[in-house]
Amino acid sequence: MLPSTLTSLLVPLFNLLIPGRLDEPSPQSQSQSQPQQLKFELRHLHAVSQDAQVIFSDVPPRTPSTQSNAHQPQDDTYTIRTRTISSFRPPSFEAFTQARTRSARFGQSELLDWDEDEVISPDVESRQTLLELAKMTNNAYVWPDDGAWYDLGGRWNISYPFGWEPDADGFRGHVFATPDNKTVVLAIKGTSAGMFGSGGPTVKKDKINDNLLFSCCCARVDWSWSTVCGCYRGGWKCDQNCVEDALIGESLFYPIGTNLYNNLTYMYPDSTMWIIGHSMGGALASLLGATFGAPSVAFESPGERMAAARLHLPSPPSTHHITHVYHSADPIAMGTCNGVLSSCALAGYAMEARCHLGKSIFYDTVSNLSWTVDIRTHGIVNVIDRLLSEPWPPSIEAGREVPEPKSEDDCVECYSWEFGDFPTSRRRLDTAGSRCGS
Ligand SMILES: *[C@@H]1O[C@H](CO)[C@@H](O)[C@H](O)[C@H]1NC(C)=O
Ligand SMILES: *[C@@H]1O[C@H](CO)[C@@H](O)[C@H](O)[C@H]1NC(C)=O
Ligand SMILES: *[C@@H]1O[C@H](CO)[C@@H](O)[C@H](O)[C@H]1NC(C)=O
Ligand SMILES: CC(=O)N[C@H]1CO[C@H](CO)[C@@H](O)[C@@H]1O
């Protein structure tokens, strides 16, 4: 019973990674001064019901967990180091939406007057901070007690939260806040579940979404695949408008994320907001971060730059407030989980996108730890226990705690495809539910 479309994914990003003008303190100066620390506690659970209402619930203070869950943290407070960076916000969400619509519908680009802000961001060059953020993204299965719903002061009503069944694959996550409410973190759990075999009613729809967002052309892998949209034009040709229309038409994930974010800023108008997530949740975190200028940290996210462009998200002057953390053995984050015999293809996914927005902290675990490329290394628990919990030797050697964040300027994806205006000549639509070309 989940918001089917939601489950899937996200994504955004911009075509351009413009060299940032973040005035980040150098790692040296940070380690000399006393790092600033924030303490968080879990404040709300959020889930999305079928009719796309955003729902919050309070987390009962320190209830011993009733469900046994391997991923349950022992402690529900987290300590995080921060630093000040600059980021760009659209003048308003309305202005952003308008610019996006003009771009998508009329091919016009409108210049937005982005506001440059100094914001407090997690110190992504601190290993402990990344580790704690990763744990927060993992902690998506805390079960609220009945009757413990958050009092929203009449701003909107709360309905039963679908999506929290242990095996449901919905858009879900947590909201954490510092005790003074100055910093609020939206942690989004991805929905990779359906991908790796656990069933559920939304898997089919999720698959369509994932394939729309992260494949080059409607998940056209070879002749034997049924594609998720009818934009393939033979050879290596793909109709650009068609893929964009299909994405905007089918993907509810991004609008739900923006709704949720808007709701949170309404609840916490004076707070600094951060957005974090794992996998698809990471891609959504980045997309939302690009939209709202909120510092975002994504773990093992598939490449979301192409989807951002296809969704026509207006591109801020810099996306360096978005940080990706991933490693080379994860075929999803690397965009190598494709090809007819890959584990993704066998499950019906074509994960071809590989370019990320913002800056990436990239761990070459294949070279340095001799990990083999395996979809099982994609899990956040693996990243927490086997990667972030240990010092990373190549960084230590370079006097850092984590690999240096770098933008993926030279990243190329879908290079064998030709995208353009290839109107259909009423060619066979090789998919059910095609919205293009007819
Ligand atoms: C919430 O629901 C109650 C009862 O269902 C109703 O009386 C109230 O007006 C609703 N409040 C809002 C803000 O919608
Ligand atoms: C923080 O926000 C919560 C609502 O989530 C509110 O109940 C609480 O009073 C706020 N605390 C402070 C110190 O403003
Ligand atoms: C991993 O990196 C460390 C530090 O740079 C280096 O000493 C070590 O030899 C590397 N391991 C492998 C297998 O390359
Ligand atoms: C205050 C606010 O932004 N409320 C929105 C919260 O989200 C729902 C849908 O998800 C919107 O309908 C509300 O307007």
Image: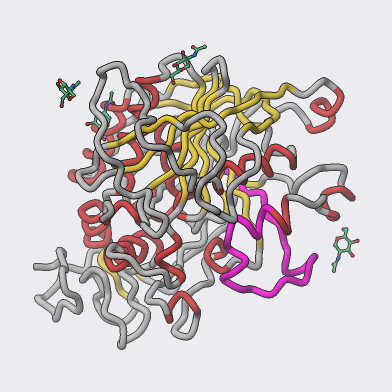
Q: Nearer the viewer, residue 154 or 307?
A: 154
Residue at image point 32% right, 62% down: 206
The answer to if 375 sits in the magenta stretch is yes
Q: Position of residue 236 (x, y in %)?
A: 34, 77
Question: 355 and 317: which one is in front?
Answer: 355
Q: Position of residue 209 (x, y in %)?
A: 31, 60
Q: Count the marks.
A: 0
Please tell me whether residue 270 is drawn above or below residue 264 in the rendered image.
above
* Closest to the observer, 1 or 311: 1
Q: Is residue 358 above or below residue 7?
A: above
Residue shown at the point (36%, 57%) measured from the top left: 168
Q: Is residue 414 magenta?
A: no
Q: Give the quadrant of residue 290.
A: top left
Give the quarter of the figure containing the N terminus. bottom left
Residue at position x 56%, y 71% from top?
375
Q: Quadrant of the image for the C terminus?
A: bottom left
x and y, in percent, of residue 366 in the image? 72, 69
